[in-house]
Amino acid sequence: MQYQTVLKKMKTELNDEVQYYLDVENDFLIFNQLLDKELEISFEGYQCLNCGEEKKIFRQGFCYECFYKSAAVGDWIMKPELSTAHEEIEDRDLDFEKKVQLQPHVVYLALSSNVKVGVTRKSQIPTRWIDQGASKAIEIVEVPNRYLAGITEVALKDYVSDKTSWQKMLKNEISDADLIEEREKLKAYIPEEAQEYFLANNGKITEINYPVLQYPTKIKTLNLEKAHVYSGKLKGVKGQYLLFEDNTVFNVRNNEGYRVIITVK
């Protein structure tokens, strides 16, 4: 069976094991059902997720022009502390920025390799944790806007990393840190503006299991632009990565905007 699509990040659903879905033309693939099957991925070109034109992808599925004009990829996306909608200050599109920034956000701890601190919209839990390949996660504060979440993350970064070792995450080399203990240690460093939003009564850890039959021992990253065609046996899915038997890994999200043909053999 062949499926054509413009790649977008996989949709997920948290059950006993994460379910992974990829939209393809007039259909969708459930990767959980494709474990131990041979997949061929063929690179066919580009299509910007914003303007829809067949332009080379620059970043995050956008062509160069769209990346620097679309409100969906403003600097505040990667750096929440730069959010200004709460002050009625526009970056690129104030209406869009209000819609995204002025809603509940959560600062959390996740365990995907080491312990890391992160920010996400409340509506994106647990999707954000799954996309990062976290095996466990716990909320620290829930604040009413993105700016407060951003300054909280910045303050906590002095005491805990905000990065994941994606190689260790994919190899399933995970620290055995106690997230509840780490959360309590960080409480004192939450900025004064966000102290009242500490989730004192929410010490619940979310545990996440992934559909993986075999973890890679060495990491070989698939570059579709160079390889054009790749074929391998699917052994697992974790984060936004497809894991293959020959230790090749393919980051679906990093290839958003690529037109591909996926063949299930």
Image (spheres, rainbow, N blue to C red):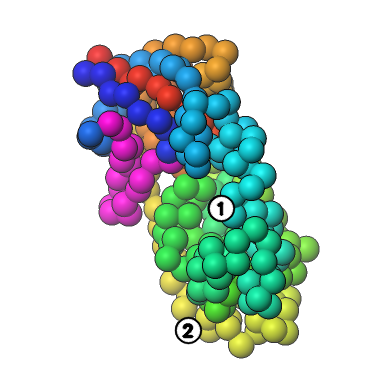
Confirm whether the magenta stretch covers residue 15. Answer: yes
Q: Quadrant of the N terminus?
A: top left
Which residue occupies the extreme right position in the image?
158
User: Residue 41: in sight, yes or no?
Assistant: yes
**Are the residues tagged 1 and 2 within 8 Å (C-beta)?**
no
Magenta-colored span: 9-25
- Residue 13 % position (x, y): 31, 52
**Which of the pair 152/199 is nearer the observer?**
152
Count residues near mark 2 (Cα–Cα under 10 Å), then give few for <14, some for 14-19, many for 20+.
few
- Residue 263 % position (x, y): 30, 17
Count residues near mark 1 (Cα–Cα under 10 Å), then give few for <14, some for 14-19, many for 20+.
some
Q: Nearer the viewer, mark 1 or mark 2?
A: 1
Compared with residue 30, is residue 197 higher up or lower down, i.e. above or below?
below
Q: Residue at x 66, y 76 (%)?
A: 88
Q: Quadrant of the C terminus?
A: top left
The image's mark for residue 72 is 1
User: Residue 216: in sight, yes or no?
Assistant: no
The image's mark for residue 161 is none
Q: Residue at x 39, y 18 (%)?
A: 41
- Residue 131 % position (x, y): 47, 47
Q: Secondary structure at mark 1?
A: helix
The residue that disc 2 covers is: 201
**Circle nearer the N terminus (1, 2):** 1
Q: Residue at x 44, y 50 (%)?
A: 130
